[in-house]
Amino acid sequence: MRFLLVLGLFFFVFSCTAANLVGSEPVPKVRLDSRKKVALVGFHPYSTSTVGVKLDGWINSPCKSVISQKYGTDLKSAFFKGRRNVPSDHRAAYPLSSQVVSPLSWGEPISKFPSTTWEENIPEENIKDFIEFSYKHLAAGALPDICEVLDWDASSKSFRLKKRNVDYFVVGFFTPVFWRPTFVGAVSFAVSFPFSFLSLGILPTVWQKQTDSFFRVYDSKLNVVKNLETKNSFWTISALWVFPSDRSKVVEEFSYDPPAWEKDVEELDRAWRPE
């Protein structure tokens, strides 16, 4: 009997496939007819690795080095308690280079706007606020984005804003970096999992995950123009008969796959337009 139970559990765990119910690919937005240039900073999905795994080249510039010495080198991390025969794992989340910006009708990745020199007369408080806002939400994971906008001036021992031909910087940080259920989602999982297990995956396990993202609009001098926090959710289903598309397939076990953040970005697009 015990052997059959173990065999059933093995079959259940390794046979069920999960899918995120994130809808179809969004229709490309008609680009807003605006003369204002908007540089998009952040908006990165995440991948995760076991804490202690070295990320080569992560702190590879004076800007990143100086900031990390003051604010820390730790990435956002979380401990995932294992089950019987499943080891516990302490994971760290780091942002990927890709950006989830297709739902926007304005703006371009900051990489499309080359920097020339440094801006003059930028208040020190503006620069400090930009760094601290970024670190608050992403810790050292924000370093690549911060140093895309700022540079370290060794002669004056201060940070300088890189000069670009832009009118606004729009910064986006997706949270939580590790997936988190809503209250309804946690209850749904607790109710559906036993039935799914006993049916060997014929009945589905369902749960709802939440997103809570933060956006900030700066003008070209790093003055804050607008703050926006968005809260959304989506469902995940797991069963033997689930055959997800490439878009809905659950790839990132501990964090979120890129389509999960699209509702947050769409909300930003509705809430603010460059004028």
Image (cartoon, grey):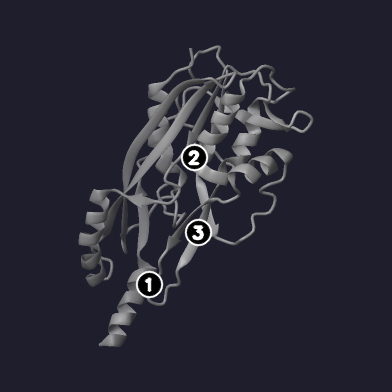
Q: Amino acid at mark 3?
A: Arg
Q: Amino acid at mark 2?
A: Lys
Secondary structure at numbered mark 3: strand
Q: Amino acid at mark 1?
A: Arg
The answer to whether residue 26 of the structure is visible from this angle is: no
> In the figure, 255 relative to 199: above or below?
above
Q: Position of residue 191 (x, y in %)?
A: 20, 60
Q: Position of residue 54 (x, y in %)?
A: 64, 58
Query: Along the horizontal axis of the image, is 225 left or right of 161?
Result: left
Extreme residue in the right direction: 155
Numbered disc in front, either 2 or 3: 2
The one of 158 and 224 positioned closer to us in this rendering: 158
Q: Which residue is mark 1?
A: 83
Q: Which residue is mark 3?
A: 91
Secondary structure at numbered mark 2: helix
Dot placed on the residue nearer the N-terminal end, 2 or 3? 3
Q: Which residue is mark 2?
A: 136
Dot placed on the residue nearer the N-terminal end, 1 or 3? 1
